[in-house]
Image (cartoon, helix red, strand yellow):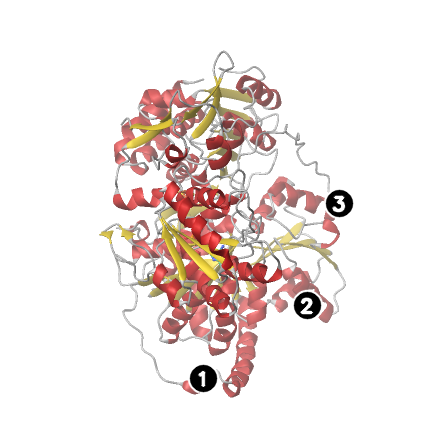
Amino acid sequence: MHELLGANGGSKRLLLGNQAIVRGALEAGISFATTYPGTPASEIGDNFYRISREIDLYFEYSVNEKVALETAAAAAVSGLRSMCSMKHVGLNVAADALMTLAYVGVKGGLVIVSADDPSLHSSQNEQDNRYYAKLSGLPMLEPANSQEALEMTRAAFTLSESHQIPVLLRTTTRVNHSRGVVTLGTLQPPQRSGSFEKDPFNLVVVPMVGRRLHVELLKKSHNLRAEANHSPFNTASGEGSWGIVTNGVSYNYVVDAIRELKLGDRIQVLKLGMTYPFAAELCLDFLKGLERILVVEELEPFMEEMLKVAAQESGLTLEIRGKEDDLLPRYFEFDPVQIKTAMARFFELDYQPPKVEPGPELPQRPPNLCAGCPHRATYYAVKQALGEGTAIYPTDIGCYTLGLLPPLQTADFLLCMGSSVSSAGGFSKAQDQPVVAFIGDSTFFHSGITGLINAVQNDHNFTLVILDNGTTAMTGQQPHPGVELTVEGPQPPKVDIEAVVRGCGVDQVLVVQPLQVRKTIGSIKEVLEGDENPGVRVIISKSPCPLFERRVTGRKQKVVFKVTEECDMCRRCLDELGCPAFTYCEDEEDCAYIRIDELLCSGCSVCAQMCHAVTPKKKSA
Amino acid sequence: MEVEGWAVWPRGSCMDSWRIFFTGVGGQGTLLATRILGEAALLTDVQVVVSEIHGMAQRGGVVESAVVMGKVLSPVVSDGEADVLMAFEPLEALRALRKCSAHSLVIANTSPISPFAVSSGKVQYPDVSEMMRTVSGHVGKLIALNARSLARGAGSELAVNMVLLGTLMRQERLPFGREPVETVIKTRTRKPFVEINLEAFDLGFQVV
Ligand SMILES: Cc1ncc(C[n+]2csc(CCOP(=O)(O)OP(=O)(O)O)c2C)c(N)n1
Ligand code: SF4
């Protein structure tokens, strides 16, 4: 049984924030869950996926976040308790649906999880998605730890249902990926099926309907504001004449700082868990009688600005500070010393942060494509096919973005998922260098297809390489519509990438197996040299991620490769492939040689095809 | 080897909070080690938070995590505030030295894993003894050991994490002893590896 299903109410578990969210949803009787994977949200969907095989819960990995939200919206409008989870930038993709879903509302509770990533641990930006609550008018909850993640998720379903509006659960990486002790509640079984009642003049948003629904939404907001003022998640504690207003993970830093700086009798803390609508009356009550207020929140001055507005409206003139004068930065996540330092500066206290020696310059250790990764083979082949020529390489998001680093250096431009295809078209129209763009298979389904159609329609001129490794590797090997390898054995893909590409109107389509190095270089050369017949050319480079392949097939690796005496130290393997299994060594007489680490070698044979000195040998058990 | 420079454990037996910072290279099992320590704390009713960063672990990058116990709630360990640094790789020990103070206990594996710039012959891997000397000069106590060879002795090089946990538990710095950790190893690690893991833990425990 799945670990989140087995545990009884009342028992204690050490749970990741993401597991606690799933457990909270199960305790609320969730029936329907959708997601598109993305760090730091991925474990929410991955747990639902496994749980959905054991209980009557519908779960899907949707093709992208917009699709995931729209799918979940239908379930919620049909009365089912539903959840849609995604990383912060996913909400940009889903924003079009989000904004109007706020008007339409829901019947069954709908909780939308936005997992933000301050410090960009694994993201392209660190946008503060709390503004989506303000922009859309949706209520928002922000847990500070795993226990709250569970409780707020459970409460979010009730809140959503009683106001017939989706609720945003906004987390940050440190909440999603911290494990904390959680006391569990009781599980509730999912509801088998919902029912939809036709109601077009509330559910079909033509202007006439939308006008009325907007006014309705503002009424809901008004009522939700009263909820926020009385929310059990908005709590004041402590004593003294100074105040701190804080939220989410920052609350932990504040509590620790008060204890360590021995300020227990001087500072009151207002912790906001329901941060939108803004609990203005509650906050004003808190402000009254205090001398000065520090607002401790990561990223943007979201609460700070609302607090200042509320204070101004009621004529309070006390000092409220946060992001100004670099007291607290608007970038990156906080850490405990930073909060102690800011508190000491603002409240004029004696505190010396620990002295930190700037360490010596050390060799960096950036992540690298795995040994045997087919992406490396594809990049190598494209560069060989181009020879002395160069090209602009618009790229996309996934493991393959690691091609950015030397020696491959096959990445020149990237914005967000799908930008490879569309920007390639733009480059081809804006300048004269040839353009070769790269996109992963999951990313292609997520948001590459529209760009491809656009390129065909507008006669863009570039080559698109689709890196089809049969899975969504970067985020934990989630399935996508083109998956062929499954634990139950190989199956035909539900959606065939080549058929999609041809269906988009592309005539010049080539499928290559990148681990067949010479053949692939030859084929790519032909495609690239066909530059005289302009248009969109697509190369589908198809070979499974070896980590994924080994996991699903359970196949054991039989061969590894070794460097023989034939090696003349030309260094091409090191300088052109950059496979992490290769090591440059020197023996006692300072004589250089190259070695392949047997533990790392995955037996892909790409190096053996480019160099006569590399030969196979049986892998020792 | 034990390096000179042992200072008194910062707050002696009246400690009410513990911050343990873990660093290593993807694939070394740092996250399993933090999780085991977290579960052991839960077993013994010690308040605990474990913080992990997922995402890059598979691809040879640096993996950092933390276990904080007792009165502390903050999941992040600031520079200069780690009570213990568990370094699974010597270069990463030095890189994470900023987390330590003159009071910190450091347990470091001396078996290096070359970053790509080193294995491609572009730069040299720094001298391990030299790095350990630098670390020891800045902290309360350093225990440097070849956890990889001990793990190999226990039956698998993958058990470096268990060796280092054993060494940590021997120091008796935490609010619980070795038993809950061994219980968690028995119940939470994969069946075929339990024996090896316990053996590795014990070999680590022998190191003082
Ligand atoms: C809008 C958005 N959603 C999700 C993500 C998270 N994310 C990063 S890469 C990736 C998938 C990559 O899969 P694929 O394109 O198949 O490449 P692979 O990692 O398999 O090489 C995802 C989902 C994101 N960056 N942006
Ligand atoms: S996980 Fe798979 S796709 Fe990603 S770098 Fe490793 S081998 Fe390549």
How far apart are the two marked residues, 1 and 3, measured between alpha carbons? Answer: 56 Å
Report the residue marked by disc 1. Answer: A202
Residue A277 in view, yes or no: no
Image mark for residue A348: 3
Residues tagged by mark 1 and mark 3 found on one chain of the structure: yes
Chain ID of residue with mark 1 = A
* A227 displayed left or right of A43: right
Residues tagged by mark 2 and mark 1 found on one chain of the structure: yes
Q: Nearer the viewer, residue A87 or A355?
A: A87
How far apart are the two marked residues, 3 and 2, measured between alpha carbons? Answer: 26 Å
Question: Disc 2, ligand 1: is the CB inside 8 Å?
Answer: no
Q: Is residue B165 above or below residue A375?
A: above
Query: Could you tell me residue A144's position as x and y percent?
Result: 52, 53
**Badge 1 element:** helix
**Badge 2 element:** helix
**Badge 3 element:** loop
Image mark for residue A310: 2
Q: Is residue A190 above or below residue A617?
A: below
